[in-house]
Amino acid sequence: MKVVILAGGYGTRISEESHLKPKPMIEIGDMPILWYIMKSYSHYGFNDFIICAGYKAELIKEFFANYYLRSSDVTFDFGRNNEMTIHNNVAESWCVTIVDTGLNTMTGGRVKRVQKYIGNETFLLTYGDGVSDVNINDLLSFHKTQNCTATITAIQPGGKFGAMDISKDKKIHKFAEKTKEDGGWINGGFMVLEPELFNYLIDDMTVLEKDPLEELASQDKLSAYQHYGYWQCMDTLRDKQLLEELVENGEAPWVKW
């Protein structure tokens, strides 16, 4: 099953670093947050990735092109054989497809652009700026019981995001505007989607979180996997520093590998 990661946005709210690199390539310690997200999926056996790139897409491509060099000891023999030898190379069981989905394409448009790489099958989707200790296998099992086109991992970060109305049967019936009250459930990414979703994605300007998901909600085709564990997005420099402290202290809840 393929994992699609949205990694094409500008990241303007963390502009201290995103003017130099795409937001998913901003590092937590020594590795970009994109790497942590991929390692989380890989921990559960999902290793086929499609990266929806856009802003500074070449930096994402360069990261993976140089992955072995970055992760291994290397000998450069200029004098004798003019050879490069990679020692104790670190291998990932990953297949990574990086697609330039445009500079100003919206989230739904980016997913639409990678349809040919996904095919007619269920796929996983998340944002390239958030980590979580959500159990992907449990999420997928839940989705299979819901008979829905889409399942969103719902989390409770407080009151600065737009909330979702979740019923007792775990269906999402509508999206609310930003609420001042804490405790509301919001879209935390880590989604499971059926290929029927592509019928709701019109063009590059389609915002996944607007018309497509709202229409699915009105049709009783959108469900919520309520996650009570750890979740954190990296919107600001303060968020980055928080995540770095967790990694440096060996306390990162999302690091399961």
Image: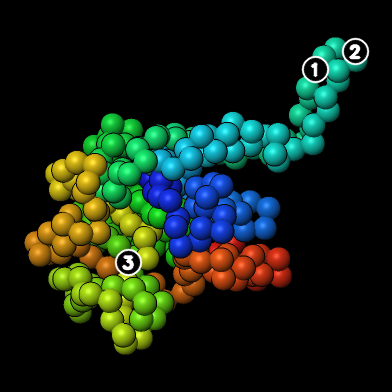
Marking on residue 80: 2
Q: Amino acid at mark 3?
A: Asn
Q: Earlier in the sequence, mark 3 or mark 1?
A: 1
Q: Badges 2 and 1: C-beta atoms under 8 Å apart?
A: yes
- The x, y position of residue 34, in whole percent, is 52, 50
Which of the two discs, 3 and 2, labels the residue nearer the N terminus?
A: 2
Find numbered disc 2 in the image and state the secondary structure of the residue it sits on: loop
CA distance for labels 3 and 1:
50 Å
Disc 1 crowd rating (10 Å Cα; few below 14, some 14-19, many 20+) is: few
Q: Is 241 rendered above or below residue 94?
A: below
Residue 117 x, y percent position in the rendering: 33, 33
Three-letter code for the amino acid on which mark 2 is drawn: Arg
**Residue 132 in the image: above or below residue 57:** below
Number of residues whose C-alpha sits closer than 10 Å to that of mark 3, classed few (under 14), some (14–19) or many (20 or more): many
Residue 141, compared with residue 63, is above or below; it is: below
The residue identified by callout 1 is: 83
Q: Please give the residue where the numbered disc 3 appears in the rendered image.
A: 187
SS at badge 3: strand
**64 on left or right of 76:** left
